[in-house]
Image (cartoon, helix red, strand yellow):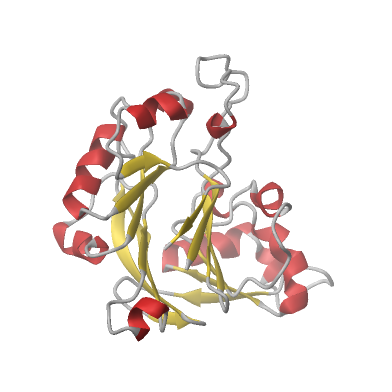
Amino acid sequence: MKLTFLGTGTSCGVPTIGCHCYTCTSPDPHDKRLRCSALVETPRTRLLIDCGPDFRQQVMPLPFRRIDGILITHAHYDHMGGMDDVRPYCQFGEINVYADPTACRGLLEMLPYCFAEHRYPGVPAILLHEILPHQPFTIGDLRVTPFRVMHHDLPILGYRIEEVGGLKADAGGPPHTLVYITDMKTIDPAEAAYAQRCDVLVVNALRRQSHHSHQTLDDAVRFASHIGAPQTYLIHSSHDIGRHAEVNASLPATIQMAYDGQTVNI
């Protein structure tokens, strides 16, 4: 299973429009962060996690092949504002989109023309699947289990993604497992159990200062240390967190900031 970070930034991206701060003026390409999205792939299956307004830019350099499913974490524009741009992929068939009831309503309101009884030619062919926490489903050779995290007072979804029938499982071991969480402020201990025993944890770290609806860098490090994954990658980071290289130098080797275009073999 391969994970590709398509975007690791917050809703404004980095550089932020009109900003000339230390991070936004960095010459390091690791400090250029598009809105959060990730691609999870096996030789058989390709899943997109969130489809924000930078989707077109993010996928242009990638091989053009079928997307088997899109997992939506929540109904905020920076996580689903690029859904209209999936239309070229409809030549492979309908686009299966998985979201909780709140995000499903958001998609229906944002893209009413995609779900009209009489759709005009060329609109994205989206097949919307309503999903609920703790109810796993399978897409190709990936098993997906949604669980609940809190984005301030908005319940949203994290995802536990396991490769079914990979080499590790074939050898009698547990499946390779990725846990992906974004925009989290808090998590109930019962929900955090769904993040345990994973190979790779991805979790949000907005900035160093407190925020009402997102984890700080310190919050993310504490959560990652509690989960104890062999490797944790931090995402959804604003310019306020600082420069990539300097933040990483202050973190344990097992907890690092991700960067746009980074690939991880799980």
Q: Is residue 227 visible?
A: yes
Residue 181 vertical placement versus 95 (above, below): above
Foreground of the two, 225 or 43: 43
- For the point 33% across and 78% down, which residue is it? 135
What percent of the width, then of the height, locates residue 44? 57, 79
Foreground of the two, 84 or 93: 93
What percent of the width, then of the height, locates residue 38? 52, 55
The C terminus - image quarter: bottom left
Residue 155 vertical placement versus 7 (above, below): below
Q: 185 left or right of 244?
A: left
- For the point 51% across and 77% down, which residue is it? 129
- For the point 35% across and 38% down, which residue is it? 205
Q: How many marks?
A: 0
Q: 167 left or right of 42?
A: left
Foreground of the two, 69 or 31: 31
What percent of the width, then of the height, locates residue 216? 30, 34
Residue 174 vertical placement versus 227 (above, below): below
What percent of the width, then of the height, locates residue 162? 38, 73
Q: Is residue 118 visible?
A: no
- For the point 66% across and 49% down, which residue is it? 58
